[in-house]
Amino acid sequence: MSDRCYNFSAGPAALPEPVLKQAQKDLWNFDGSGMGVCELSHRGKEYDRILEEAIADCREVGNVPDDWHVLFMQGGATMQFACMPANFSGEGKTTDYIDTGEWARKAMEEAQRFPGTVNCAFSGQGENYNRLPKDSELKTTEGAAYLQFCSNNTIMGTEFKRVPKAAAGVPIIRDASSDMYSRPIDFSELDMIYASAQKNLGPSGCALVLIKDSFLQKSDDKHIATMMSYKVMQKKESRPNTPNTFAVYLMGQVFKWIKAEGGLKAIEKYNEEKIAPLYDFIDGSDFFIPHAVTEDRSIMNASFRTPNEELDKLFIKQAEAKGLKTLAGHRSIGGMRASVYNAFPAKGITALVDFMKQFEHENAG
Ligand code: PLP
């Protein structure tokens, strides 16, 4: 019997088994160096190789264009919420935000702490964020410094399958924290992508940032902290200070795992096939109620509930006892949420659906 449960956490989330097993070994002795991976100097030759390989594998996996930089930054995605306006906004400038959920709104609110005008191009708050906007609903700004959108709304379980339309020539930034490398990326429509690591990539506290050189050159970083400057991060190879070496190492291992799994097309197919039985079951049930409208739902996070809060609580408790853990929905919408990132096994969905069938049978009125 396995000593691991099915971990449906939204993040930090389940990591691939081969990655964790390799990390266990490397924590003790990295590649015969006699030093554990967390004990290596960030200026030493072993870490040079870890960083170089992580960048090369990140590029290969994502098919990242040559004129884009790969950066590893600290402070998670929330730090990126501040870095964007700090680098690219300012007095007399406007930035556009699409408010499709809790994290999208937090990014916008962070920008409001900085000089410059923040324009909310669309807000789904009034509809409890259960759908995404059509391009015709967006009120974007001509000449904006950038438009930011969140491609996967972790809490609501909605996901953009396309890049929303900004005003002509306006750079587009994508928060891909909860769907990074879950499917191929079309870089032609984007200028920057960032993702907190703790869902599809590695441990928390770190963010992967992919940024187009022409956009990076627009950054005005004279009056901002060194650690927040994209130009400094690029020049200093993501190590202006002592970086989170373990996070970079682990992300590197995850990129290698994605390659071994057949790359992003294969991962996308696996993710789509993996979550389908859950959505099929919810669609056919008169008992479970999905949060997101069908056409916008995510392949990473499924949010749903039962007819009442008492039953939600009972569901979560009984599921936990069966080894189906961390299924409670976010406090802002309640109910349940199954987060099933790249590393989450299909067997876990089968176990969840079996349990849902049984629960419905026992509790439907
Ligand atoms: N953006 C999205 C879409 C998220 O889901 C999260 C966290 O769950 C964040 C940003 C914030 O990430 P962090 O906690 O790394 O700052």
Image: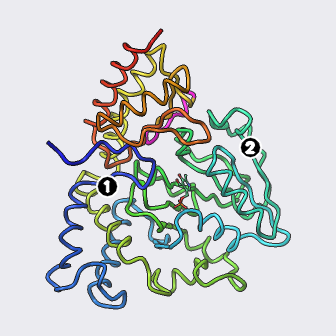
Please say whether residue 335 is one of the residues in the magenta stretch: no
Residue 122, which numbered label? 2
The answer to whether residue 98 is left or right of residue 119 is left
* Residue 102, above or below 92: above
Q: Is mark 1 within 8 Å of ligand 1?
A: no
The answer to whether residue 168 is left or right of residue 49 is right
Q: Residue furthest right?
A: 92
Q: Quadrant of the N terminus?
A: top left
Q: Nearer the viewer, residue 355 or 95?
A: 355
Q: Residues within 10 Å of mark 2 (few under 14, many from 20)?
A: some
Q: Residues within 10 Å of mark 1 (few under 14, many from 20)?
A: many
Residue type, mark 1 in image: Leu
Secondary structure found at label 2: strand
Which quadrant of the view contains residue 216?
A: bottom right
* Residue 96, above or below 46: above
**Which residue is depicted at the point 50% across and 67% down?**
209
Classify the position of ligand 1 by quadrant: top left, top right, bottom left or bottom right: bottom right
What is the basis of the colouring in this image? rainbow
**Which residue is depicted at the point 68% across and 51% down?**
105
Point out residue 97 in the picture as x, y percentages from the top left corner: 71, 53
Q: Nearer the viewer, residue 49 or 110?
A: 110
Secondary structure found at label 1: loop
* Residue 211, above or below 315: below
**Which residue is depicted at the point 44% across and 53% down?**
11
Point out residue 165 in the picture as x, y percentages from the top left corner: 66, 47
Report the Cα–Cα distance between label 1 and label 2. Answer: 34 Å
Say which label, 1 or 2, has the lower sequence index.
1
Residue type, mark 2 in image: Phe
| Residue stretch rendered in magenta on the structure | 293-301
Point out residue 95 in the picture as x, y percentages from the top left corner: 75, 60
| Residue with the mark numbered 1 | 15
